[in-house]
Image (cartoon, rainbow, N blue to C red):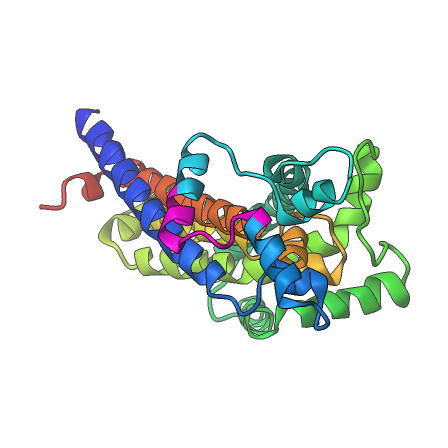
Amino acid sequence: MLSIFKIVLQRLGLGLVTLFVVSIVIFVAVNSLPGDFAEAILGQGATPESVASIRRDLGLDQPLVMRYFTWLRGMLTLDLGTSFAQLNFANFGGAGTTTVAEQIAPRLANTMFLATVTACIAVPLAVTLGILAALYRNTAFDKAANMFTLSSISSPEFFMAYVLILFLAVLNPIFPSLSNIYDGMPFSERLEKSMLPALTLTLVVTAHMMRMTRAAIISLLASPYIEMARLKGMSPMRVIVIHALPNALAPIINVIALNLAYLITGVVVVEVVFVYPGIGQLFVDSVKIRDIPVVQACCLIFAAAYILLNLTADILSIISNPRLRHPK
């Protein structure tokens, strides 16, 4: 137990160091984008004086290092700041401002809802298909599953999204093509409007998880203890589920965690196609107007989610496989 606790602490420390390095990369990359908020709002006809005035009001005229440490201090105190669009609106007589956290919270909740719906469909489906493909290896079912997953992996997300819209929204109007959900919407209606983006993401992530499950189980089927289980008369399904699957959990957990991280960080294209009001859509809208505080906060949330899920997968893999705790 102490060794696991020590490994968890080591992984947490490594995750925090990684997040700090990523924060530097995010800040430099976002601030290196061509143009800024003042130029995006005022347009090509803006005078240098008006652009300089807005930059001064927003603090964009300060040195880059000073702005980074100000932003980092805000992140450490959970203060994500105020978006440039809101500050500019208030300077021109707008009533009140909305902080970045208040802007992101409902969008992040929508993205988490979409990720949860997708995970509830994709993970059981992928593991079941992987087990069946390993059980019926080299049969027509295995070949059909491999062909389907290879096609799914090879197709871009937006293409899969438009194919689903064509067949499930246009030719057969089962689900709405636009996912315009809002606060207070009944759960059943929210689920219906989220179904097409969830199915698109399911097609994308199921392929990776199914293929990894199949490969991990097949690699264990030649092991002596599996042969012994067969010689004792156990059925093939029982051999896989009881003896092979538990020992194949480490790579399966890793690929599931990576795909769950993708459901949070890689949904930008899917949310834009379906006009889904998630954090990916907010990220794209903020990049268009160079709203740096919102873009930086979205990037940091993406990075934190990715690091946290990888950390979780690492720890679960170590717990599920005692050999990883004792590498000798």
Percent x, y of residue 70 = 42, 41
* Residue occupying the point 51% across, 66% down: 33
Please state, as top left, top right, bottom left or bottom right, where the N terminus lies in the image. Answer: top left
Left or right: residue 28 versus residue 178 is left
* Residue occupying the point 68% across, 47% down: 88
* Residue occupying the point 63% across, 48% down: 84
* Residue occupying the point 25% across, 48% down: 225
Percent x, y of residue 268 = 62, 58
Q: Is residue 8 visible?
A: yes
The range drawn in magenta is: 57-69
Left or right: residue 251 versus residue 11 is right
Say if 268 sits above or below 78 in the image: below
**In the image, residue 61 lies in the stretch drawn in magenta:** yes
Percent x, y of residue 164 = 76, 65
In the picture, residue 43 is in which quadrant? bottom right
Say if 263 sits above or below 94 in the image: below
**In the image, residue 86 lies in the stretch drawn in magenta:** no
What kind of secondary structure does the magenta stretch mostly adopt? helix
Residue, far top: 1
Say if 70 sits above or below 65 in the image: above
Question: Could you say which is closer to the camera, residue 231 or residue 18?
Answer: 18
Say if 60 sits above or below 35 in the image: above
Percent x, y of residue 42 = 71, 63
Question: Could you say which is closer to the camera, residue 77 or residue 108?
Answer: 77
In the picture, residue 167 is in which quadrant? bottom right
Q: Is residue 128 visible?
A: no
